[in-house]
Amino acid sequence: STKIETLPDPFKMVEKELQPFSDSIKELVSSDQPILSMAAKHFFEKRHGKRFRPTIVQLVAKAVAAAPPEKIVDDDGKTISADLLEEHSAVFEKIGGVSGWQWSGASSVEVDGGIITPDNHEGSDAWRRQAQLGQIVEMIHVASLIHDDVLDEADTRRGGEAVHKLYSNKVAVLAGDYLLARASVLLARLENTAVVQIMATALESLVAGEIMQLKAPPESLLEMESYLRKSYYKTASLICYACRSTALLGGHSYGSTVATACEEFGFHLGLAYQIQDDILDFTAAASVLGKPALADMDLGLSTAPILYAAQEYPHLRPLVMRRFKEKGDKQTALEALYKSKTAMNKAKALANFHAQRAIDAILRLPQSEARDALIRLTHAVITRKK
Ligand code: FPP
Ligand code: FPP
Ligand code: MG
Ligand code: MG
Protein backbone atom coordinates (compact mmCIF):
# COMPACT_ATOMS: atom_id res chain seq x y z
CA SER A 1 0.00 0.00 0.00
CA THR A 2 1.07 3.57 -0.72
CA LYS A 3 1.64 6.06 2.09
CA ILE A 4 -0.62 9.06 1.65
CA GLU A 5 2.25 11.55 2.12
CA THR A 6 4.08 10.08 -0.85
CA LEU A 7 1.26 11.16 -3.19
CA PRO A 8 1.61 14.53 -4.96
CA ASP A 9 0.48 17.61 -3.02
CA PRO A 10 -2.83 18.73 -4.58
CA PHE A 11 -2.45 22.40 -3.75
CA LYS A 12 1.16 22.59 -4.99
CA MET A 13 0.17 20.91 -8.23
CA VAL A 14 -2.29 23.63 -9.20
CA GLU A 15 -0.46 26.57 -7.60
CA LYS A 16 0.62 27.89 -10.98
CA GLU A 17 -2.88 27.69 -12.42
CA LEU A 18 -4.49 29.37 -9.42
CA GLN A 19 -1.93 32.20 -9.37
CA PRO A 20 -3.71 34.39 -11.94
CA PHE A 21 -6.98 33.50 -10.24
CA SER A 22 -7.19 36.54 -7.96
CA ASP A 23 -6.31 39.08 -10.63
CA SER A 24 -8.65 37.78 -13.25
CA ILE A 25 -11.50 37.23 -10.84
CA LYS A 26 -11.14 40.79 -9.58
CA GLU A 27 -11.67 41.93 -13.12
CA LEU A 28 -14.53 39.52 -13.62
CA VAL A 29 -16.41 40.84 -10.61
CA SER A 30 -15.69 44.52 -11.12
CA SER A 31 -18.77 46.63 -11.53
CA ASP A 32 -19.47 50.33 -11.99
CA GLN A 33 -21.29 50.13 -8.69
CA PRO A 34 -18.34 50.51 -6.29
CA ILE A 35 -20.13 49.00 -3.33
CA LEU A 36 -20.93 45.83 -5.25
CA SER A 37 -17.37 45.46 -6.49
CA MET A 38 -16.07 46.06 -3.02
CA ALA A 39 -18.31 43.57 -1.32
CA ALA A 40 -17.65 40.98 -3.98
CA LYS A 41 -13.90 41.52 -4.35
CA HIS A 42 -13.48 41.25 -0.67
CA PHE A 43 -13.71 37.47 -0.84
CA PHE A 44 -11.38 37.02 -3.76
CA GLU A 45 -8.42 38.95 -2.39
CA LYS A 46 -7.34 38.83 1.22
CA ARG A 47 -9.98 36.43 2.45
CA HIS A 48 -10.03 34.01 -0.41
CA GLY A 49 -10.59 30.90 1.69
CA LYS A 50 -9.26 27.49 0.90
CA ARG A 51 -10.11 27.55 -2.81
CA PHE A 52 -11.04 23.95 -2.55
CA ARG A 53 -13.40 23.99 -5.48
CA PRO A 54 -11.13 25.59 -8.09
CA THR A 55 -8.37 23.24 -6.90
CA ILE A 56 -10.60 20.23 -7.45
CA VAL A 57 -11.72 21.47 -10.87
CA GLN A 58 -8.09 21.97 -11.97
CA LEU A 59 -7.05 18.54 -10.76
CA VAL A 60 -10.04 16.83 -12.37
CA ALA A 61 -9.23 18.68 -15.60
CA LYS A 62 -5.73 17.20 -15.55
CA ALA A 63 -6.93 13.77 -14.52
CA VAL A 64 -9.49 13.48 -17.33
CA ALA A 65 -6.91 14.66 -19.87
CA ALA A 66 -5.14 11.38 -19.14
CA ALA A 67 -8.25 9.38 -20.06
CA PRO A 68 -8.91 8.74 -23.75
CA PRO A 69 -12.46 9.76 -24.73
CA GLU A 70 -14.92 6.93 -25.34
CA LYS A 71 -16.80 6.80 -28.61
CA ILE A 72 -20.34 6.50 -27.44
CA VAL A 73 -22.32 8.96 -29.50
CA ASP A 74 -25.51 7.55 -31.00
CA ASP A 75 -26.12 7.22 -34.73
CA ASP A 76 -27.75 10.61 -34.92
CA GLY A 77 -24.95 11.98 -32.79
CA LYS A 78 -27.47 13.60 -30.49
CA THR A 79 -29.03 11.29 -27.94
CA ILE A 80 -27.38 9.21 -25.26
CA SER A 81 -27.84 5.46 -25.55
CA ALA A 82 -30.37 3.82 -23.27
CA ASP A 83 -27.95 1.91 -21.07
CA LEU A 84 -25.89 5.02 -20.46
CA LEU A 85 -28.97 6.90 -19.47
CA GLU A 86 -29.81 4.06 -17.17
CA GLU A 87 -26.38 4.06 -15.61
CA HIS A 88 -26.66 7.77 -15.14
CA SER A 89 -30.09 7.72 -13.56
CA ALA A 90 -28.92 4.96 -11.24
CA VAL A 91 -26.28 7.31 -9.91
CA PHE A 92 -28.82 10.06 -9.58
CA GLU A 93 -31.32 7.91 -7.83
CA LYS A 94 -28.68 6.92 -5.35
CA ILE A 95 -27.91 10.51 -4.63
CA GLY A 96 -31.45 11.73 -4.77
CA GLY A 97 -31.01 13.85 -7.96
CA VAL A 98 -32.83 17.08 -8.60
CA SER A 99 -36.56 17.16 -9.18
CA GLY A 100 -37.52 17.61 -12.78
CA TRP A 101 -33.98 17.21 -13.98
CA GLN A 102 -33.99 15.86 -17.48
CA TRP A 103 -31.21 15.84 -19.93
CA SER A 104 -31.97 17.11 -23.40
CA GLY A 105 -29.23 17.96 -25.80
CA ALA A 106 -26.16 16.68 -27.50
CA SER A 107 -24.27 13.96 -25.71
CA SER A 108 -20.78 14.65 -26.80
CA VAL A 109 -18.68 17.76 -26.72
CA GLU A 110 -16.42 18.72 -29.55
CA VAL A 111 -13.08 19.92 -28.38
CA ASP A 112 -11.41 22.33 -30.79
CA GLY A 113 -8.13 20.92 -31.91
CA GLY A 114 -9.02 17.26 -31.38
CA ILE A 115 -8.48 14.87 -28.53
CA ILE A 116 -6.97 16.21 -25.32
CA THR A 117 -3.97 14.36 -23.91
CA PRO A 118 -1.79 15.20 -20.91
CA ASP A 119 0.77 16.57 -23.37
CA ASN A 120 -1.44 19.04 -25.22
CA HIS A 121 -3.84 19.86 -22.37
CA GLU A 122 -2.07 22.87 -20.90
CA GLY A 123 -2.75 25.98 -22.97
CA SER A 124 -5.54 24.29 -24.93
CA ASP A 125 -9.01 25.77 -25.33
CA ALA A 126 -10.40 23.03 -23.13
CA TRP A 127 -7.89 23.92 -20.44
CA ARG A 128 -8.88 27.61 -20.58
CA ARG A 129 -12.55 26.76 -20.31
CA GLN A 130 -11.94 24.41 -17.40
CA ALA A 131 -10.00 27.13 -15.60
CA GLN A 132 -12.94 29.49 -16.18
CA LEU A 133 -15.27 26.89 -14.76
CA GLY A 134 -13.14 26.79 -11.60
CA GLN A 135 -13.63 30.54 -11.23
CA ILE A 136 -17.34 30.30 -11.90
CA VAL A 137 -17.71 27.62 -9.24
CA GLU A 138 -15.85 29.74 -6.71
CA MET A 139 -18.06 32.73 -7.56
CA ILE A 140 -21.19 30.66 -7.03
CA HIS A 141 -19.74 29.34 -3.79
CA VAL A 142 -18.92 32.82 -2.48
CA ALA A 143 -22.36 34.11 -3.53
CA SER A 144 -23.95 31.30 -1.56
CA LEU A 145 -21.75 32.04 1.49
CA ILE A 146 -22.70 35.73 1.44
CA HIS A 147 -26.39 34.80 1.36
CA ASP A 148 -25.91 31.99 3.84
CA ASP A 149 -24.48 34.35 6.46
CA VAL A 150 -27.58 36.52 6.12
CA LEU A 151 -29.88 33.51 6.51
CA ASP A 152 -27.87 32.09 9.39
CA GLU A 153 -27.29 35.47 10.99
CA ALA A 154 -23.62 34.56 11.22
CA ASP A 155 -21.42 37.57 11.87
CA THR A 156 -18.04 36.14 10.87
CA ARG A 157 -16.70 34.42 7.79
CA ARG A 158 -13.20 33.49 6.77
CA GLY A 159 -11.75 35.01 9.89
CA GLY A 160 -13.39 38.41 9.48
CA GLU A 161 -16.72 40.15 9.41
CA ALA A 162 -19.39 38.76 7.11
CA VAL A 163 -20.49 40.97 4.22
CA HIS A 164 -23.81 41.79 5.88
CA LYS A 165 -21.92 43.00 8.95
CA LEU A 166 -19.46 45.05 6.90
CA TYR A 167 -22.30 46.63 4.96
CA SER A 168 -25.92 45.64 5.49
CA ASN A 169 -28.32 42.79 4.75
CA LYS A 170 -29.53 44.63 1.69
CA VAL A 171 -26.06 45.03 0.26
CA ALA A 172 -25.23 41.40 1.07
CA VAL A 173 -28.30 40.15 -0.79
CA LEU A 174 -27.45 42.27 -3.80
CA ALA A 175 -23.74 41.41 -3.72
CA GLY A 176 -24.61 37.71 -3.78
CA ASP A 177 -27.08 38.25 -6.61
CA TYR A 178 -24.51 40.25 -8.48
CA LEU A 179 -21.87 37.53 -8.21
CA LEU A 180 -24.42 35.00 -9.40
CA ALA A 181 -25.28 37.19 -12.36
CA ARG A 182 -21.61 37.54 -13.27
CA ALA A 183 -21.13 33.80 -12.90
CA SER A 184 -24.05 33.22 -15.29
CA VAL A 185 -22.52 35.46 -17.95
CA LEU A 186 -19.20 33.64 -17.68
CA LEU A 187 -20.99 30.31 -17.83
CA ALA A 188 -22.71 31.28 -21.06
CA ARG A 189 -19.33 32.35 -22.45
CA LEU A 190 -18.12 28.76 -22.18
CA GLU A 191 -20.48 28.13 -25.11
CA ASN A 192 -21.38 24.67 -23.95
CA THR A 193 -25.10 24.21 -23.39
CA ALA A 194 -24.64 20.91 -21.53
CA VAL A 195 -22.40 22.60 -18.99
CA VAL A 196 -24.80 25.54 -18.65
CA GLN A 197 -27.63 23.12 -17.97
CA ILE A 198 -25.64 21.15 -15.42
CA MET A 199 -24.36 24.18 -13.55
CA ALA A 200 -27.79 25.84 -13.55
CA THR A 201 -29.06 22.65 -11.93
CA ALA A 202 -26.34 23.00 -9.31
CA LEU A 203 -27.77 26.42 -8.43
CA GLU A 204 -31.22 24.92 -8.14
CA SER A 205 -29.82 22.29 -5.77
CA LEU A 206 -28.19 24.88 -3.52
CA VAL A 207 -31.47 26.67 -3.06
CA ALA A 208 -33.36 23.37 -2.61
CA GLY A 209 -30.91 22.37 0.13
CA GLU A 210 -31.40 25.61 2.02
CA ILE A 211 -35.19 25.37 1.78
CA MET A 212 -35.08 21.77 2.95
CA GLN A 213 -33.06 22.84 5.95
CA LEU A 214 -35.44 25.71 6.69
CA LYS A 215 -38.73 23.90 6.23
CA ALA A 216 -38.03 20.28 7.19
CA PRO A 217 -40.97 18.51 8.90
CA PRO A 218 -40.03 17.71 12.53
CA GLU A 219 -39.93 13.90 12.09
CA SER A 220 -37.51 14.20 9.19
CA LEU A 221 -35.08 16.03 11.46
CA LEU A 222 -34.31 12.68 13.09
CA GLU A 223 -33.63 10.85 9.85
CA MET A 224 -30.09 10.25 8.75
CA GLU A 225 -31.32 10.02 5.18
CA SER A 226 -32.89 13.48 5.22
CA TYR A 227 -29.69 14.86 6.68
CA LEU A 228 -27.63 13.26 3.91
CA ARG A 229 -30.00 14.34 1.16
CA LYS A 230 -29.94 17.90 2.40
CA SER A 231 -26.14 17.74 2.59
CA TYR A 232 -26.03 16.52 -0.99
CA TYR A 233 -28.13 19.44 -2.18
CA LYS A 234 -26.45 22.17 -0.27
CA THR A 235 -22.85 21.00 -0.43
CA ALA A 236 -22.04 18.06 -2.64
CA SER A 237 -24.14 19.09 -5.64
CA LEU A 238 -22.02 22.08 -6.58
CA ILE A 239 -18.81 20.11 -6.54
CA CYS A 240 -20.21 17.00 -8.20
CA TYR A 241 -21.79 18.95 -11.05
CA ALA A 242 -18.58 20.92 -11.41
CA CYS A 243 -16.61 17.68 -11.69
CA ARG A 244 -18.90 16.32 -14.42
CA SER A 245 -18.78 19.65 -16.28
CA THR A 246 -14.97 19.59 -16.13
CA ALA A 247 -14.98 16.18 -17.81
CA LEU A 248 -17.36 17.47 -20.49
CA LEU A 249 -15.20 20.50 -21.18
CA GLY A 250 -12.30 18.08 -21.53
CA GLY A 251 -14.07 16.37 -24.43
CA HIS A 252 -15.68 13.45 -22.59
CA SER A 253 -19.28 12.77 -23.49
CA TYR A 254 -22.19 13.25 -21.15
CA GLY A 255 -22.81 9.61 -20.28
CA SER A 256 -19.20 8.44 -20.43
CA THR A 257 -17.63 6.38 -17.68
CA VAL A 258 -15.16 9.21 -17.15
CA ALA A 259 -17.85 11.87 -16.64
CA THR A 260 -19.83 9.59 -14.30
CA ALA A 261 -16.73 8.67 -12.30
CA CYS A 262 -15.96 12.38 -11.86
CA GLU A 263 -19.46 13.14 -10.70
CA GLU A 264 -19.45 10.26 -8.23
CA PHE A 265 -16.11 11.41 -6.93
CA GLY A 266 -17.50 14.91 -6.33
CA PHE A 267 -20.64 13.52 -4.75
CA HIS A 268 -18.83 11.46 -2.14
CA LEU A 269 -16.11 14.03 -1.56
CA GLY A 270 -18.74 16.71 -0.98
CA LEU A 271 -20.59 14.55 1.52
CA ALA A 272 -17.37 13.61 3.33
CA TYR A 273 -16.49 17.29 3.49
CA GLN A 274 -19.88 18.29 4.89
CA ILE A 275 -19.89 15.55 7.52
CA GLN A 276 -16.40 16.59 8.59
CA ASP A 277 -17.64 20.20 8.69
CA ASP A 278 -20.47 19.15 10.98
CA ILE A 279 -18.07 17.24 13.25
CA LEU A 280 -15.79 20.27 13.47
CA ASP A 281 -18.75 22.39 14.52
CA PHE A 282 -18.61 20.41 17.79
CA THR A 283 -14.91 19.80 18.15
CA ALA A 284 -13.12 22.93 16.93
CA ALA A 285 -12.96 26.45 18.32
CA ALA A 286 -14.39 29.46 16.50
CA SER A 287 -10.93 31.06 16.48
CA VAL A 288 -9.62 28.08 14.52
CA LEU A 289 -12.59 27.84 12.18
CA GLY A 290 -12.79 31.53 11.34
CA LYS A 291 -16.55 31.27 11.74
CA PRO A 292 -18.80 30.61 14.74
CA ALA A 293 -18.47 27.18 16.39
CA LEU A 294 -21.33 25.17 17.96
CA ALA A 295 -23.46 27.12 15.52
CA ASP A 296 -25.60 24.33 14.10
CA MET A 297 -27.66 23.67 17.22
CA ASP A 298 -28.20 27.39 17.63
CA LEU A 299 -29.79 27.24 14.18
CA GLY A 300 -31.94 24.32 15.27
CA LEU A 301 -30.00 21.89 13.11
CA SER A 302 -29.11 18.33 13.99
CA THR A 303 -26.15 16.91 12.11
CA ALA A 304 -24.52 13.46 12.10
CA PRO A 305 -23.00 13.50 15.62
CA ILE A 306 -26.28 14.56 17.26
CA LEU A 307 -28.35 12.17 15.14
CA TYR A 308 -26.21 9.25 16.27
CA ALA A 309 -26.42 10.46 19.87
CA ALA A 310 -30.22 10.63 19.55
CA GLN A 311 -30.28 7.02 18.38
CA GLU A 312 -28.47 6.05 21.57
CA TYR A 313 -30.33 8.40 23.92
CA PRO A 314 -34.05 8.54 23.04
CA HIS A 315 -34.60 11.51 25.35
CA LEU A 316 -32.83 13.65 22.74
CA ARG A 317 -35.40 12.94 20.06
CA PRO A 318 -38.05 15.47 21.09
CA LEU A 319 -35.28 18.07 21.44
CA VAL A 320 -34.13 17.43 17.89
CA MET A 321 -37.70 17.64 16.64
CA ARG A 322 -38.34 20.97 18.30
CA ARG A 323 -34.98 22.26 17.02
CA PHE A 324 -33.55 22.83 20.55
CA LYS A 325 -36.00 25.64 21.04
CA GLU A 326 -36.52 25.26 24.76
CA LYS A 327 -34.17 26.46 27.44
CA GLY A 328 -31.55 23.86 28.35
CA ASP A 329 -32.14 21.76 25.20
CA LYS A 330 -28.73 22.48 23.71
CA GLN A 331 -26.95 21.77 26.98
CA THR A 332 -28.80 18.45 27.35
CA ALA A 333 -27.96 17.41 23.81
CA LEU A 334 -24.31 18.38 24.18
CA GLU A 335 -23.97 16.46 27.41
CA ALA A 336 -25.45 13.35 25.81
CA LEU A 337 -23.15 13.71 22.83
CA TYR A 338 -20.05 14.02 24.98
CA LYS A 339 -21.17 11.16 27.20
CA SER A 340 -21.74 8.84 24.25
CA LYS A 341 -18.81 6.62 23.46
CA THR A 342 -19.99 5.95 19.93
CA ALA A 343 -21.83 8.94 18.41
CA MET A 344 -18.77 10.93 17.38
CA ASN A 345 -16.98 7.81 16.15
CA LYS A 346 -19.95 6.85 14.02
CA ALA A 347 -20.01 10.30 12.44
CA LYS A 348 -16.29 9.97 11.77
CA ALA A 349 -16.86 6.56 10.21
CA LEU A 350 -19.57 8.01 7.97
CA ALA A 351 -17.17 10.67 6.70
CA ASN A 352 -14.54 7.99 6.13
CA PHE A 353 -17.02 5.84 4.23
CA HIS A 354 -17.76 8.61 1.76
CA ALA A 355 -14.09 9.51 1.43
CA GLN A 356 -13.37 5.89 0.52
CA ARG A 357 -16.17 5.87 -2.05
CA ALA A 358 -14.77 9.08 -3.55
CA ILE A 359 -11.39 7.39 -3.89
CA ASP A 360 -12.99 4.29 -5.44
CA ALA A 361 -14.69 6.49 -8.04
CA ILE A 362 -11.59 8.44 -9.01
CA LEU A 363 -9.59 5.22 -9.25
CA ARG A 364 -11.72 4.39 -12.29
CA LEU A 365 -9.67 7.00 -14.17
CA PRO A 366 -6.26 5.99 -15.47
CA GLN A 367 -3.33 6.64 -13.19
CA SER A 368 -1.93 10.17 -13.32
CA GLU A 369 -0.23 12.61 -10.95
CA ALA A 370 -3.46 14.63 -10.79
CA ARG A 371 -5.54 11.58 -9.96
CA ASP A 372 -3.22 10.72 -7.12
CA ALA A 373 -3.30 14.31 -5.89
CA LEU A 374 -7.11 14.02 -5.75
CA ILE A 375 -6.72 10.95 -3.55
CA ARG A 376 -4.46 12.87 -1.22
CA LEU A 377 -6.94 15.77 -1.19
CA THR A 378 -9.76 13.41 -0.24
CA HIS A 379 -7.67 12.21 2.66
CA ALA A 380 -7.00 15.82 3.69
CA VAL A 381 -10.74 16.55 3.70
CA ILE A 382 -11.45 14.03 6.44
CA THR A 383 -8.35 14.72 8.50
CA ARG A 384 -8.64 18.51 8.40
CA LYS A 385 -8.92 20.32 11.70
CA LYS A 386 -10.52 23.51 10.39
C1 FPP B 1 -17.69 26.96 3.47
O1 FPP B 1 -16.94 26.43 2.44
C2 FPP B 1 -18.62 25.96 3.92
C3 FPP B 1 -19.70 25.58 3.28
C4 FPP B 1 -20.19 26.22 2.04
C5 FPP B 1 -20.47 24.51 3.86
C6 FPP B 1 -20.23 23.29 3.26
C7 FPP B 1 -19.30 23.31 2.15
C8 FPP B 1 -18.56 22.28 1.92
C9 FPP B 1 -18.75 21.19 2.89
C10 FPP B 1 -17.56 22.21 0.79
C11 FPP B 1 -18.00 21.38 -0.40
C12 FPP B 1 -17.15 20.28 -0.72
C13 FPP B 1 -15.91 20.27 -1.21
C14 FPP B 1 -15.21 18.98 -1.34
C15 FPP B 1 -15.17 21.45 -1.63
P1 FPP B 1 -15.44 26.15 2.61
O2 FPP B 1 -15.23 25.38 3.88
O3 FPP B 1 -14.88 25.58 1.37
O4 FPP B 1 -15.02 27.63 2.86
P2 FPP B 1 -13.96 28.59 2.23
O5 FPP B 1 -14.30 28.73 0.76
O6 FPP B 1 -14.19 29.84 2.99
O7 FPP B 1 -12.63 27.99 2.45
C1 FPP C 1 -23.19 26.98 3.92
O1 FPP C 1 -23.72 26.06 4.80
C2 FPP C 1 -24.13 27.29 2.80
C3 FPP C 1 -24.30 26.60 1.66
C4 FPP C 1 -23.48 25.41 1.37
C5 FPP C 1 -25.29 26.95 0.62
C6 FPP C 1 -26.02 28.23 0.82
C7 FPP C 1 -27.02 28.41 -0.26
C8 FPP C 1 -27.87 29.42 -0.30
C9 FPP C 1 -27.89 30.49 0.72
C10 FPP C 1 -28.86 29.47 -1.41
C11 FPP C 1 -28.60 30.62 -2.33
C12 FPP C 1 -27.64 30.20 -3.36
C13 FPP C 1 -26.93 31.00 -4.16
C14 FPP C 1 -26.14 30.41 -5.26
C15 FPP C 1 -26.87 32.48 -4.01
P1 FPP C 1 -23.62 26.19 6.38
O2 FPP C 1 -24.43 27.32 6.85
O3 FPP C 1 -23.93 24.85 6.92
O4 FPP C 1 -22.06 26.41 6.56
P2 FPP C 1 -21.21 27.49 7.33
O5 FPP C 1 -20.93 26.90 8.65
O6 FPP C 1 -19.97 27.64 6.53
O7 FPP C 1 -22.00 28.74 7.40
MG1 MG D 1 -23.92 29.17 7.68
MG1 MG E 1 -26.48 27.74 6.42
Image (spheres, helix red, strand yellow):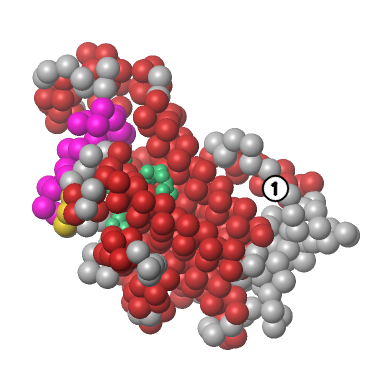
Residue name at image x 53 percent, y 40 percent? 95
Q: Position of residue 255 (x, y in %)?
A: 69, 55
Image quadrant in which you'd find residue 210: top left
Label 1 crowding class (10 Å Cα cut-off): few <14, some 14-19, many 20+?
A: some
Q: Is 76 on the left or on the right of 35, as rendered?
A: right
Q: Is residue 114 magenta?
A: no
When asked about the image quadrant of residue 166, the answer is: bottom left
**Residue sitting at x 80%, y 61%:** 73
Residue beneath the point at 17% across and 38% down: 294
What x and y, as percent, mark residue 76? Answer: 88, 59
Q: Is residue 153 above or below residue 363?
A: above
Q: Residue furthest front?
A: 32
Q: Is residue 289 magenta?
A: yes
Report the residue marked by disc 1. Answer: 103
Residue 265: % across, % down? 50, 55
Whether residue 58 is visible to the viewer of this picture, yes or no, is: yes
User: What range of the chain is rendered magenta?
Assistant: 281-305
Horizontally, is 269 left or right of 128 in the view? left
Considering the image in quadrants, where does the C terminus appear? bottom left
What kind of residue is marked 1? Trp
Instruction: Tally the numbered discs.
Output: 1
> From what the image shows, is residue 226 above or below residue 202?
above
